[in-house]
Image: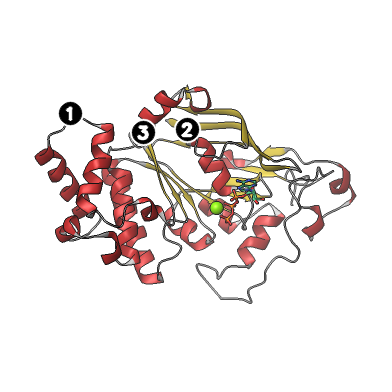
Amino acid sequence: MKLLSIKNESVVYRSKTKNVLAVNNVSFDIDKQDSVGIVGESGSGKSTLALALLKLLPKNADVTGEVLFEDKDLLKLSTDEFNDLRWKEISIVFQKSMNSLSPIHRIGSQMADIYTIHDGSADSDEVKGKIINLLEMVNLPTRVYTMYPHELSGGMMQRVSIALSLMHNPKLIIMDEATTALDVITQGQILNEIAELEKKLKIARIMISHDMSVVANTCRKIAVMYAGYLVEFGLVEDVILNPKHPYTKGLLKSFPPLKGEKGELRSIPGYLPDLSIPHEGCIFKDRCPQKENICLYTAPKTHIVENGRKVMCNFAGGDC
Ligand code: ATP
Ligand code: MG
């Protein structure tokens, strides 16, 4: 069952001197309880895409397209309607979500304040019980309730952020590099906990990460972005074992493989194009090892291949 449907989403950041086309006509769906990882190098538009879903972009960003969440178009909701939906239906965890907490108030009282913004009817004992329960759910000791933000380690902070995001039982949680800054062991523990919580609470997840292996290990589907475009989308096993877009192939070679022999890691030569300059042909042509003449002048369509998989390449119909 479909939960979220992103249709032809584009985002332009406008300024006096230039317009940056950060997300370009992106479409994909997320089912209930599904998990989609978004990967792509820095500046490819991952965060912009996610922030647009939650109306969290700055004022100079123009968003077009449709974002249907259970058939409501999120882009058309009023600010009040949207505020009602955020946290209760969709929540987000950033790399530094905890920075928004006050350093001079205890974690428990701040969590309680945030809770009551969206549910003013709950009495204080009920709210405290709920928060202690949430802390336990993310494997934090109860004493965190009376601690101050500066007393927590990085891993504990991200667990508090995750607890906050789960507070009102959302149907979708978005994690934008939420575990990137943590050491590998803590990251692994938190990712395992999230996977278990998701099953228990029946939540869908969008996971933004630079790290292919994080997405491959924790998501069912993968969306590969390049310079604002969705260049490949599909089931993790299909995309990882048999990448079809040359960019996905390059990206996979720049990470250690999950299984089998560890070959030499190679980064993709070249840089992302300047997103404020209109381009002709394929957006990846300057870096593509498989480009042909057609790629210089013809913008590739998104081909739908097996298992609902999408590939935006001029050769996606054959062996690209
Ligand atoms: P990273 O992996 O580094 O987080 P990302 O894939 O999340 O990168 P975005 O942050 O979405 O990429 O940025 C996409 C493009 O939009 C980049 O070219 C960036 O410079 C530009 N951009 C982002 N925020 C703004 C803004 N507020 N004003 C103008 N341009 C912006
Ligand atoms: Mg980002």
Which labelled disc corresponds to residue 4? 2
Residue at the spot of label 3 = 89
Quadrant assignment, res 255:
bottom right
Q: Nearer the viewer, residue 1 or 60?
A: 60
Residue 247 seen in the figure: yes
Cα distance in 3D space between marks 1 and 2: 29 Å
Instruction: Note whether 64 is above or below 106 in the view shown.
Output: above
Identity, as a three-letter code, of the amino acid under mark 3: Glu
Few, some or many C-alpha atoms within 10 Å of disc 1 (few <14, some 14-19, many ≥20)?
few
Cα distance in 3D space between marks 3 and 2: 11 Å
Most extreme residue toward the front is: 104
Left or right, 228 with respect to 191, comes to right
Picture coordinates of residue 76, whole percent (x, y):
52, 22
Cα distance in 3D space between marks 3 and 1: 18 Å
Identity, as a three-letter code, of the amino acid under mark 1: Ser
**First in residue order: circle 1 vs circle 2:** 2
The number of numbered discs placed on residues in the rendered structure image is 3
Q: Quick one: SS at disc 3?
A: loop
Q: Nearer the viewer, residue 43 or 230?
A: 43
Picture coordinates of residue 237, whole percent (x, y):
52, 54
Left or right, 80 with respect to 235, comes to left
Identity, as a three-letter code, of the amino acid under mark 2: Leu
Tell me what residue is drawn at x 67 percent, y 71 percent: 266
